[in-house]
Image: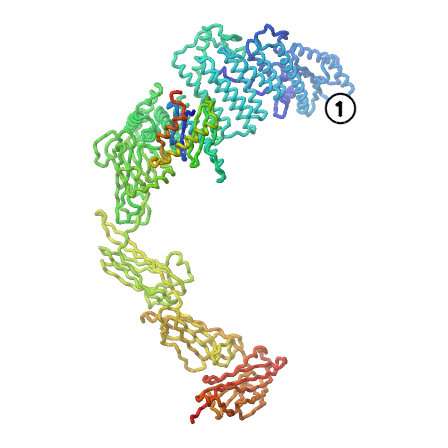
Amino acid sequence: MSWASEFPDVLLCRPTGLVVLTGLDTTYNAVHTAIWDSFCNNRRPDRVPLQFRVLGADHEYPKCKTKRTSYEWYMPRGVLKTGWMSKHLQQVPAVVVCFFDLDWDEVMWKERQMECATKVQIVRDSLSGRSTRVCVVLIQKNAPLPPGEDVVAAERAASLCSSCELSAKSLFVLPLTDHLLGYTIRLENAFYELSQSYYHTEARRVKSHKEFLNKTTHQLLYVRHQFKIAFFNELKQDSHTALKHYKQAYGHMLELRMHDTNILEVKTIGGYINYKICRLSFQHNSPLDAISQFRKHIDYFKSRAGNPELAFENCAWMSKQFQVFGDLFDEAIKLGLTAIQTQHPGFYYQQAASHATVRKQLVEALKKNDLHSPSPNPLELLDKLDFFGQRPWRQNHQSIDPPDALKERDGILALQVQELKVDHSWLIIPLLSNAMSQFKKYKSARMKRYLMVQMGFEYCHAKDYSKALTLLSRVTFDYRQERWWLLLTNILSTELKCSFLTAKVQDYVTTSLELIGQHTLNSIEDKTRIQMNLIRVMSGNRPEAEPDCAEECTEKARQLWKVALATSDPQIITIEMHNIVPFVECKTQFTQSSFTTNQEITIQVFLRTTCQFPIRFSKLSILLNKQHYHGKCMLNDGNGITNDNTIAEGGDLYLVPGVIKTHSFSFVPDQSDVGQTLEITSVALELGNEGSICAILLWPRGGGDAVATPLSQQQISHRFPVKPITDPTDWRSIQVQASTKLVSRPAQLEVTVAHCSPCLLQEVYQMTVNICNKEDTPIKGVEFDLRMKSGQSEDSKTHLSVALDCKSGAQDSKSCSLKINFGDIAVGESITRDIFLQCDDVGIRNFVAQVSYDIEQSVNTHAITCRCEKSLIVDIDVVKPFDVNLKMNSLLFAPVACIHSDEPFLIQAEMSCLSPWTIEILNTELNLSQSVRFTDDEVESQLKGLSVESDECVNECQCLVAYPTVSPSINLGSYVITWRRSSAGTTIPPVTTEVPLPVANIELVPVLVELLTPSCGYIQKVFPVTYEIHNRTPYSQELEFSMDNSDNFMFAGHKHVRILFKIASITIAMFLIYFFRFISECFRSQRSTCTTTLFRCSLVTWLFLGSMSTSSATLTAWMVRSRTCYPLTSSSARVEKKAAVEPPSSLFEIHFWSICILRFVFFCK
Amino acid sequence: MAVCVAVIAKENYPLYIKTSNADNELKYSFTVHTSLDVVEEKISSVGKNANDLRELYLGLLYPTEDYKVYGYVTNTKVKFVLVVESSNTSLRDNEIRSMFRKLHNAFVDMQCNPFHSPGEKISSRSFEKTVATMMVPESHS
């Protein structure tokens, strides 16, 4: 039947004009061969669309029919002759070219010209009556001269043209130079023009017939003529005109009356014209036109199936139409057209496949009738038809009824017999595969899968079962995933059939497992049958045949099964259950989310089958991430698979549908696994006998439902309270728990770390560890471990020391952790130990104290040693114990910024206690440097033995003198405090805290005035005043000293002295002062009183400083010192720089006021 | 009238498939299933802008020779698919729309039933009744 729907090559190819080259001897003449090669080889798309043939000059072309002058009595016998297109493509040339070797300077010109003319004439004769263009090409050895220069050439060319009856335009010259291809292309273009004019004339000629036609009798001719015009236009490469005429042809064709006798012809031609229209539309980049034309075409012919006995013919035709359109569409896409998801060639291929499938089904119906080819065969002339689409037994017949009913029946029968020989599957599969690749390209994964399924079915139909199996097994996953059970069942059933027929045990078993489950939608009978077959296979027997299998295939399968099951090696089939939706479901759980090491670990396994009949498994084992437990998680069913009721000794794996079977495995954990996670890596359930054939059903992790609940449903189910307890009868409530933690046994210990926080800086801090055994049995190997919490120990700046022994000194073992071995502790006993800590930095320290020990335990008569642990966190805050403030003061307790050498000053230490604990000061000490000394010979700590409480403050003060020095500042030394917290026992070593003394700036003073007065004066008594003036410069100085008068005093002695002030000598000026005035107020107040009064003296000196480096600026301060501490006698000195004199000697005037405290003695009257 | 009505869950598994002729159920199932390709494509191409209100009615999904497949997706991504025979030219876009609306209403009514657990196969009698009104009568094919 394929003949009727086939598209001839002449239709599918792109029509190109035919040019015949004559006079070329391509066999013996090398020059001619080169010319021919340049024409026919390497025809790239940029060259003109022409087809060349080399023929002899006397070649016989198809005879031209005599021109019809009238169509009046002409009855057309068909639409289009089968040979017409090929005739014009391959036989009737548009142009005939005569090649002739002739140079313009040929000696025997006349003779050669004659010869050429004869040749042209021969060609003309052979074309008898056709309007084919004839032209002459002269092959010349010499290169041509520029046009117009060669007079001889022009003359001879004219004469040649006239003798050959050629127009000047049809004469060409081909010089044999290096640029042969260039000349060829120029010639080609000239031929192309000639061919276009030829085809144009031909089209016009056909068009001219139109006026002779009438609609009643010449309907077929309307189609034919339009088709021919279009075809000639195509040859002319005028595709737009061609398309127009094809459309007209199609229009005329739709007007044809259709009946059973001509339906095939109409459809064939319709298909051809439609093909041309679509092809040209795509070519003109109007795919929508092509698609709508095709739709119209299909819609029109879909309902016109013709003779029901030949319905398959219609399907074949439809299939071909779709396929060809798909090809056209695809080709257009390759040339740059873009398609979309809902409009691409895949749909057409798919439709083609579906029509092909219908055709196959129709043929299958035919197979039931016993058909024999009639003789003589009416299809003998099938390949030699006159017209496209006609019946071979009644060609050229155009009436409505067949001429011979008997012959007609024979013909139909013969067609049917022929159709039966076609292998339809191999027509369908390539179409499906084409469609598949298209749908894949346009992101239609499900459609692609559907096509794969169809392809699988088709392979199955074509009896290529293993290929079918491969294809189908690749798609089941997705249908399973999306839970389209109906589709899945359908596919699996076919898979089962295929695996049965190929005796693939693994596939057979896997598919069966799924098909007998609850989710697949096959009938109960089917399920029963499949389960029985499964049991047969698992017990080493051959399964029964699947229904709807061809007898010979079943027979072959039986042999295959025999071989497959006869192998002596045990067959182990491993099936991953998460890849399928099996009939048996498994859930496992650890009964607790964590187990202590002295507990037995229990794993519960829940099994449920959803098949029709009970089934017995042979072995259940649980694989954990620790392999040493495997032996303890195994259950064997001693009975064979066929054994139904007896309960086995070892275990029972006889599963009744719908009843949940529970098994539990218990084992004692290994002590080395403490702290680790125990996980179920997989659950294996074995079906069948390990010795012969055995299927291992493998669930990863702890198993689960056969079908995972979609997320949305899970969320919804959480709206209702989840049952906390696993109900062993409700499958859905069973939760999978595939991992558990092994933790150490909780320690029954009392551990305390007693200490008095906060800890003081640098103090030896005592902590007391107390461990009390509250267990029922003695504990062994008790270890106490104290370390800084992770993250803190890295802080190297805060080095702290934990030491056991006070005497060895906390400073020696500077480590951040310690370990104490307490040994064994009896029941109820407690052990106490002190540990010590010293911190050199303030801040909070977090310690982890951990106690671990061994204890003997018995679990289920097993004696095991458990390691238990207890840990607690100890937080210690380290604070500063006190603050020491060291100040330098003058002897008058005025703070000083700098000191003067050889002059005493005070160092005052103020210690304020910050700690909450009372601090006992054991000693304080000033460690002086080389540059200072005490003024007193014996120095004793003033704070020794004091206890300072929180927020209290103690002071001490020492008088120091600095040695003369040249450096501007000196280091005074340090202040050392030895202390301990008063609550600490004497065993605790005291802490020595050293505070550096401030760095003192030394200032050089050239003159020192010292006032020596009694502590107080009495009114009207002598009050001796002595000024000691020290010269600190290495030079002699002149000094003028004057005493001012005062209202309150009168004095004796020099009022004004002038002294030469020797080097380093001390000059004393002494005055006696009498109290002179009486202050009546003092009496009036009737009480004894003190008052202070001032007196002033001035000192004027020329200081010669010589080469002393002290600059004048440092001389701003003068010191007046008084030995007397009490009552206060303060003197102040004012220095006035009299004038800016040169540094070596400056005049200074010094005024100083001395204050005298006077005591009035009151006499009562 | 439709020859097949299908309701498909958000996760693309069928909640309900009703065909006018039980023999064709497999074929229609495949048709409905493959139409999900287009449905998904259409949903994903709209979903870019959250402010865009997607029209629930997706229109014609697949132009096949014998059937027209129409799609409708609720806001919770539950899909309705209607398969209509191509020969049935009386059904216009508007009628299809109203059929979908009817179906949607029936679906919502059913979801409101406190005894219905969402995500499970549909077995509601009133829903069946609504579907039956828009199906080609069984005897027809």
Q: Is residue A689 left or right of residue A428?
A: left
| The quadrant where residue A1107 appears | bottom right
**Residue tagged 1:** A146
Three-letter amino acid code at the position of disc 1: Pro
Instruction: Return the x and y of residue A611 as percentages of the image width and height.
Output: 29, 30
Instruction: Return the x and y of residue A141 as percentages of the image width and height.
Output: 71, 21
Parent chain of label 1: A
Quarter in which the C terminus of chain A is drawn: bottom left
Q: How many numbered discs sit on the rendered protein?
A: 1
| The quadrant where residue A995 appears | bottom left
Q: Residue at x 40, y 64 (%)?
A: A842
Instruction: Return the x and y of residue A531 as percentages of the image width and height.
Output: 29, 28
A987 or B8, which lies in front?
A: B8
Q: Residue at x 48, y 91 (%)?
A: A1019
Helix, strand or loop for disc 1? loop
The reply to whether residue A456 is in sight is no
Graded by Cα atoms within 10 Å as few (under 14), some (14 to 19) or many (20 or more), the crowding at tag 1 reads few
Q: Which residue sits furthest bottom? A: A1165
A1073 or A180, which lies in front?
A: A1073
Please, is residue A1120 above or below residue A294 in the view? below
Q: Is residue A631 left or right of residue A1129?
A: left
A639 or A71, which lies in front?
A: A71
A138 or A950, which lies in front?
A: A950
Please, is residue A31 above or below residue A642 in the view? above
Q: Residue at x 52, y 29 (%)?
A: A339
